[in-house]
């Protein structure tokens, strides 16, 4: 970049932080292009999961999380992002164009940027310590500012979500293509994507919410009592690609807020990957007033829990588009 905008080194440092965003099965389905006065985000359809995510909901949400991570990282070093979402009607995979304006960072932006390397997906059980209501209210405030709503799931809605999660898990267990896809993206050693064995604990048969059965799961889970996580649902007023992108941004905002507080988090999307269960949750949990995009377990990790290892990520260079052959892209 030139003409008073941040140099490529600064932009690539921000892109490295953006790449720390969570993604379904850690497929990292984003690509970036650095223009003369902008940064462009593209969905990489080659990293789609046709059995797990047939309508590409999860990977667009994942890209939305990366977009928010990028925005926070740039804002923290003095460059406020101006985001143009879905800027090219002829290319639905061109998800965003980001231009930058010099501006002094806020304390919140610095805090959220600092939280990026601290955030990890913690699939272990959480302790029974309650989350102060003020934190839950803050999550709602941050999500709404980014284009989605978030609410705590209580009884009896929680029972409905649990039933949907178990039904989705049974459906996937009988789906050979799904199980093959999950095995291909998990249990990895030395890979820069996918879910490493060291990041997934063995599922417990009595768990309220069934966990995905990742290959060669090897993460120790010291919790001896049932999981005491709060369960949140993210929803949007529509269910198009733009809404899913905004949901990912809102999810990122809540995840980084939770990490900054010191809370453990784990996204759950499996109950929404089966259309019948997703439609039921929309009617029974959201009363038909919103479209569910993801669930989030959030709570305090037990004091006996070991720090989580960082999940590997692809290099910035591996995610960059370096040619000019991007259809309809603007510099």
Image (tube, rainbow, N blue to C red):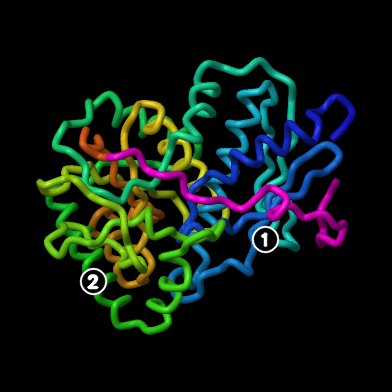
Q: Position of residue 2 (x, y in %)?
A: 88, 31
Q: Give the dominant element type of the magenta stretch: helix, strand or loop.
A: loop
User: SS at mark 2?
Assistant: helix
Instruction: Please give the range of residues in magenta.
Output: 306-331
Badge 1 crowding class, 10 Å Cα cut-off, few under 14, some 14 to 19, many 20 or more, is some
Q: Which residue is mark 1?
A: 93
Badge 2 crowding class, 10 Å Cα cut-off, few under 14, some 14 to 19, many 20 or more, is some
Magenta stretch: includes residue 321:
yes
Magenta stretch: includes residue 287:
no
130 lies left or right of 31:
left
Q: Earlier in the sequence, mark 2 or mark 1?
A: 1
Vertical order, 224 against 273 (above or below): above
At horizontal 30% and vertical 53% (from top left) the residue drawn is 219
Quarter holding the N terminus? top right
**Viewer can see residue 144:** no
Which numbered marker is on residue 122? none
Q: Which residue is mark 2?
A: 167
Q: Position of residue 163 (x, y in %)?
A: 18, 64
Vertical order, 110 against 331 (above or below): above
């Amino acid at each position: 970049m030139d003409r008073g905008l941040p140099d490529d080194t600064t932009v690539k440092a921000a892109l490295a932080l953006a790449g720390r965003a969570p993604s379904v099965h850690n497929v990292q389905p984003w690509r970036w292009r650095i223009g003369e006065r902008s940064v462009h985000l593209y969905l990489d359809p080659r990293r789609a999961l046709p059995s797990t995510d047939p309508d590409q909901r999860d990977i667009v949400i994942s890209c939305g999380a990366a977009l928010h991570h990028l925005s926070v990282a740039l804002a923290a070093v003095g460059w406020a992002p101006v985001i143009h979402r879905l800027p090219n009607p002829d290319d639905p995979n061109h998800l965003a164009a980001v231009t930058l304006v010099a501006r002094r960072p806020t304390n919140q932006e610095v805090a959220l940027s600092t939280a990026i390397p601290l955030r990890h997906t913690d699939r272990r059980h959480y302790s029974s310590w309650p989350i102060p209501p003020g934190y839950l209210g803050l999550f709602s405030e941050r999500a709404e500012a980014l284009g989605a709503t978030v609410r705590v799931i209580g009884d009896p809605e929680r029972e409905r979500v649990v039933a949907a999660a178990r039904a989705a898990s049974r459906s996937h267990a009988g789906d050979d293509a799904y199980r093959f896809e999950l095995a291909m993206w998990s249990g990895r050693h030395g890979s820069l994507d996918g879910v490493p064995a060291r990041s997934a604990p063995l599922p417990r048969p009595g768990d309220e919410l069934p966990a995905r059965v990742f290959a060669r799961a090897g993460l120790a889970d010291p919790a001896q009592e049932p999981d005491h996580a709060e369960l949140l649902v993210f929803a949007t007023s529509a269910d198009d690609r733009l809404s899913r992108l905004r949901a990912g941004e809102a999810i990122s905002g809540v995840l980084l807020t939770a990490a900054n507080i010191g809370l453990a988090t784990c996204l759950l999307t499996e109950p929404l990957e089966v259309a019948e269960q997703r439609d039921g949750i929309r009617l029974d949990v959201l009363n038909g007033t919103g479209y569910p995009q993801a669930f989030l377990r959030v709570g305090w990790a037990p004091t006996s829990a070991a720090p989580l290892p960082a999940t590997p990520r692809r290099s910035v260079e591996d995610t960059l588009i370096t040619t000019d052959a991007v259809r309809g892209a603007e510099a």
